[in-house]
Image: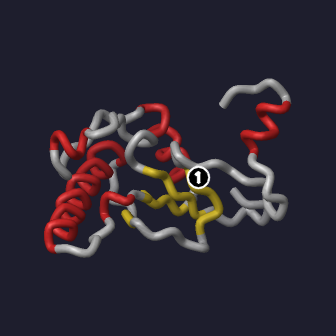
Amino acid sequence: MEKNNQPEAIAYDFDKTLSVYEEGDIDKYGPEFVGPPIQRMIDEVKQAIADGHDVYIFTARVNPGDSYEQALNATKSYLVLADFCLKQLGQLLPITDRKSSKWKRIIDDRADQVIPNTGVRVTELMAAHGADR
């Protein structure tokens, strides 16, 4: 919760964060491929929802792109992600490819956090103190 006890809006990436994904899985299996859930993250999302946070699924998979085929694949992906939400979380969450200013946190396997207004990456500080990512 935020300091004023208001719920936060939190975005969770899908592949490699909520669901196991190996490079090339979509190329190999198609846009409807979904790996097994990562239970630790599923439990975290469930707790965030129970705590009253607004939770979003954030993934490039649902970007409609510039062609009919890309739009069709985005639609197929959206439908399997919606099904994943229902099965794993018990409810449909908003699914988007667009970053939102209302999100207070983004949980993602690719993000490299920067300390606000400094340009200093958290990984730089970790490395300076002998910590691995």
In this picture, is 96 found above or below 16? below
- Mark 1 secondary-structure assignment: loop
Q: Residue at x 75, y 48 (%)?
A: 121
Disc 1 marks which residue?
51
- In front of the other: 88 or 112: 112
- In front of the other: 49 or 69: 69
Q: Residue at x 49, y 52 (%)?
A: 12
| Quarter location, residue 101 | bottom right
> Viewed as shown, does residue 30 lie left or right of 50?
left
Q: Residue at x 59, y 52 (%)?
A: 51
| Image colouring | secondary structure
Of the 4 image quadrants, the one containing the N terminus is bottom right
Report x, y in % for residue 118.
Answer: 84, 59
Report x, y in % for residue 96.
Answer: 39, 66
- In front of the other: 92 or 95: 95
Q: Residue at x 27, y 57 (%)?
A: 82
Report x, y in % for residue 102.
Answer: 60, 72
| Pointer 1 local density, CA inside 10 Å: few below 14, some 14–19, many at least 20 | few
Q: Amino acid at mark 1?
A: Asp
| Quarter location, residue 116 | bottom right
> Viewed as shown, does residue 69 lie left or right of 4?
left
Of the 4 image quadrants, the one containing the C terminus is top right
Report x, y in % for residue 10.
Answer: 56, 58
